Amino acid sequence: MSTEHAHGSASAEVAARVERRWATIAVLIIVGMALLAAFAGIHRATMPQPRVETTDPSRIHLSGEFVESNLGSVLEANGSVTVRAIGQQYSFTPACIVVPADTPITLRATSADVVHGILIQGTNVNTMLVPGYISEQLMRFTKTGDYLMPCQEFCSFGHEGMWGKVKVIDKTEFADRAKGGGRLSCVGQ
Ligand code: CUA
């Protein structure tokens, strides 16, 4: 009886020690992830979207914000620019996005089919396009020039060929082109 009791308390001790060890590891993992989130938010200025916006991927071509005539870049009354784009297997619409330099830009995009991603090389613009949800990301370019925009989520066989381009042009040139109204893009240029 006494040996059984001693054995029981020894294994309870082992269990308590193992439990403390795993609890410590779990706390360290949580602290590590909090530090990573703080680093990404403060140092790299990448924030999660403040709100969730939904859309119906089976109807985006028919009506609402993402109909074809509304895609592209538009100069807003306050001087900022809004870019609307769609990702679908295996291209972006518009395939070439034109924006002005030194201007606050809001990118609003969604997917018409499966999960895609938009990444603008050399910048911190990087967001997933999830069918049913609108991804919004703020961006600003200090230099003019061309940036590659590959799809960064595997979206099936044509994924490797899914590339877009962002053309950053001079602010006054953009304002000139925006005078006629409508939506701007650099497709075919
Ligand atoms: Cu679209 Cu990968």
Image (tube, helix red, strand yellow):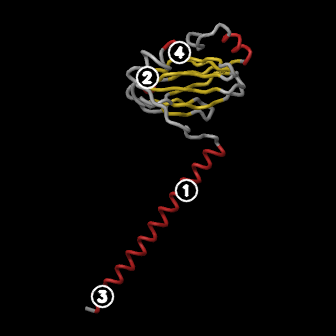
Three-letter code, disc 4: Asn
Sequence-earlier tag: 3 or 2: 3
Q: CA distance from mark 3 to mark 4?
A: 77 Å
Residue at point 43%, 22% (across, down): 88
Three-letter code, disc 2: Gln
Please identify the quarter of the rendering in which residue 79 is found: top right
Q: Which residue lies under the disc numbered 1?
A: 32
Element on which disc 2 rests: strand
Q: CA distance from mark 4 to mark 2?
A: 16 Å
Q: Which residue lies under the disc numbered 4?
A: 70
Sequence-earlier tag: 4 or 2: 4
Q: CA distance from mark 1 to mark 2?
A: 36 Å
Tell which of 103 and 120 is nearer to you.
103
Mark 2 Cα shell of 10 Å, populated few (<14), some (14-19), many (≥20): some
| Camera-side mark, 4 or 2 | 4
Residue at point 50%, 18% (across, down): 93
The quarter of the picture where the C terminus appears is top right
> Does residue 39 appear left or right of residue 131 in this picture?
right
List x then y, in percent, for residue 125. 59, 32
